[in-house]
Each structure stands twice: as structure tokens, then as C-alpha cells.
Image: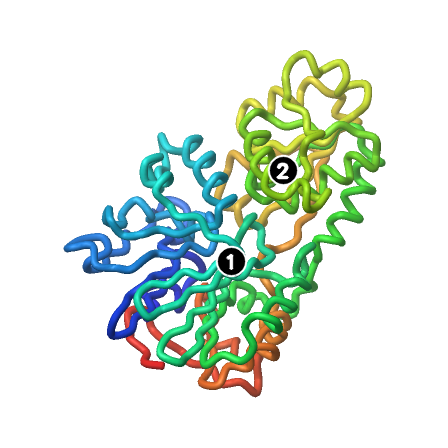
Amino acid sequence: MIHRGTHQIGGCCTEIRTGQARILIDFGDELPEPGQVSQPLELEDVTCGKADCGGVFFTHYHGDHVGQLSRILPGIPLYMGSAAKEIFSLYQRRVAAHHPAATEKTIAAIQPLHPLGRVRVGDIIVTPLAVDHSAYDAYMFLIEAQGKKLLHTGDYRLHGFRGKGVLTALEKYVGQVDALITEGTTLSRPGREVVTERDVERDAAKLLQENKYVFLLCSSTNIDRLATFAAAAKKAGRLFVCDGYQKSILDVVTRHSGEKSPLYDFSRALTYGQNLLPMMKEKGFCMPIRGGEWAHSLAERFDPRKSLFVYSMWTGYLERDPALKALLDGQNSVILHASGHGSPEQIKAVCDIVRPRVGIIPIHTDAPEQLSKAVDPYSVIFLEDGITYKL
């Protein structure tokens, strides 16, 4: 059953149950229009009643997948990637005053997931598979029960640094499934050219060579984007500087993956302080910022003729956040971004590997009807929120 997400992007929650067990995948906030708030998701024995659920598995830490975690009854097991859990904890401490998704006690109780580390809940086996997304340590889930196989993709893409690894993992560890539940964020944007993370890397290197002071507006948890610009800064001989909060997130990534890949080694990142200003002015820098008055006042310390603001997020946020748009007004700025979501062609590539016997269920999309054209000749199963489908 898809409790929410069959006809909207975000706010997802999927339930899978057998006669013996019940699990949920994601429990997120909706992405409302400006001035609106996400509607609470009410589930019997999950948010009220007797806490009767074998576990809630989170694909990643974005708010539209984890934002209503605090409403889940105590005693229900929660699961999230080990690094993702740490990043989520840091983020929650920062936003707890105005947008709490969970208390520190609840986050501490989350059980860590690891790639291919199987979790058994009754007669259901859940296998996490690492995916490439704009959230670090994100997962697809292979669900096996009663002789059937279901793959829930969560959010994913194939055009990031680790995109090819997604298809390799599906071939090696999943194979053919009975059903595929796939995100379809980009189905309402057909025909758009796919900008890859390598494209961003190439253009970022050029921008860092041509502009001495580069302010990067991107999510503090979009680790691949931060890695792209950190590498570009190093190549251009610039400093990579961030505030203490951002550095704490990058330290988590370095600790988990820095030895495995130089891409995720942020040990050279500097924490901003007044003492760094002379060096920043002399050598130039790339600095991630998140808007607000502090970013304005910092930018004023540097020659605007040598400064560039790079906007590297979904452009829809500029329409939703006047303060963010105001930060860029009158500045020398460019938009350079690669989506965290796969194109329709990439969804088809996944289908060609797992070859769903029964069909494909679209979620996390406001244009589910577009999936049929994208994945032909595979069958598509169109569901409504709250309707049970028996596999």
C-alpha cells in the first residue's frame, strides 16, 4: 500500500505487509506550496494505537522522506544508513527550534543500515542497496517475502559519480523482481537535457579558475556537490572554506569514506574565522553558504568584481524562498546544478535490469501517467493513496 506519494512529489510512505509482518518505507513531509504546511500522516498502530509495526526503513534523510519521523510511536524500530543517521542528527540539532523531525533520543535509537546488510522482520527480508542521490548514504531496498521479490528504489539517479555502480549492484544482487516501486520525480519534465555531476565538475573548475571568490549556494547535505566544488577549488589553487556546521557534516563523510575515496576526503576543508580573511583575499576561495544576513555581510568583505555566486539547487526554491532570491539579486551569479533524480531513460535502464514480472508502481511523482511511455513494454500499475495492492 502506498499511503502517500502516488500523485505527488514528496511526503512518501509505503507499507509492505504479509500475514506475519508489517514494515514501512519512509515517513516524510509533503512539499507544500508557500504558506502551506504538510498534512500529518495518520496510521493506525504507527502514529496512534499500540505500536504494531516491525520497522520503518528510511531511504535517506531528506525531509520529504523522514520529516514526520517524530510522529512514529516509541517502540517501533527505525532504520537508516549509518552515515546518514549522523548527518541527520547534525541537521536536526541545527533546525530543531523551528522544524523538528525527531528528538536526539529518537535519533540515537535509529538502527544503522549498511550496504547489503540484510534485516529480517518476521518473514520479510530487507536488503539495502547503496544508490547515487543528492543525499549521502541513500538506499534502495530489496524486499523478499513468501517467495516474492519487490524493489523499492527510493530517490536515485545514474548521472552522479556513483551512478554506474547502481546498475552493477542491481545486476549482481537483485536480478529479476516481481514488482518495482520507482520514484518518478522527472516524469513531469520530459525532454530536458540531463546535466551530469561530471558536467558540473567541469564547469565548476572553469568558474574557480576565472573567479577569485566563489560563494556556493547548495544544500549542506548534498555531499557530491560539495565534493565537486572542493575538488575544483583544489585544482584552481583556491581554498575551500566553510562554517563550523558544514565542516561537522563533512567530517562525518571523511570519517566514513575518506579512506575509500579521495572524493570524500574533506580533511583539507578550512573552518571560517576572522583569522582566515587575509589568506582568503590573497589566494581566493570557494565557500558553501546557505543565504541569510551572515552570507550578505561576508560577501561584502570581498571585491564584487572578483566574486561569483553559484546557485546549485533546484530552481523552484528561488520561487519559494524570497530571502534566497534576494541574496542573488544584484550579484554576479550563475546557475550550475545536476538533479538528484533520474531521467525517464534512467528509470527504463533500471527496469531493463530487474525486468519486473508483474509491473511497475510509480511514486514520488506528479505525473505517474508518463511512466507508461518511458518504460514500454513493461506493465505499469497505477495506484491511489491508501489502496491496498496484493502482489
Q: Which mark is residue 254?
A: 2
Q: How did the renderer colour the structure?
A: rainbow
Q: Quadrant of residue 278?
A: top right
Secondary element at tag 2: helix
> Which quadrant of the rendered structure holds the N terminus?
bottom left
In the displayed structure, 220 sits above or below 378; it is above
Q: Residue at x 18, y 53 (%)?
A: 48
Quarter assignment of residue 226: top right
The residue positioned 56% from the left and 36% from the top of the image is 252
Task: Specify few, some or many for label 1: CA neighbours under 10 Å numbering under 14, 14-19, or 20 or more.
Answer: many
Residue 180 left/right relative to 11: right
Which of pointers 1 and 2 lies earlier in the amino acid sequence?
1
Cα distance in 3D space between marks 1 and 2? 19 Å
Q: Position of residue 73 (x, y in %)?
A: 23, 49
- Where residue 314 appears, as percent x and y from the top left, is 58, 50
**Whole-percent x, y for residue 212 in the image:** 80, 28
Which residue position holds label 1?
139
Q: Which of the pair 176/132 is nearer the observer?
A: 176
What number of labels is visible?
2
Q: Where in the figure is residue 319, as x and y percent of width and height? A: 52, 46
- Looking at the picture, tell me which residue is in the foreground, 248 or 328: 248
Question: Compared with residue 146, is residue 197 higher up or lower down, i.e. above or below?
Answer: above
Quadrant of image for the C terminus: bottom left
Q: Are marks 1 and 2 in contact (CB under 8 Å)?
A: no
Q: Residue at x 56, y 22 (%)?
A: 294
Three-letter amino acid code at disc 2? Thr
**Residue at position x 50%, y 81% in the image:** 356
**Amino acid type shown at disc 1:** Tyr
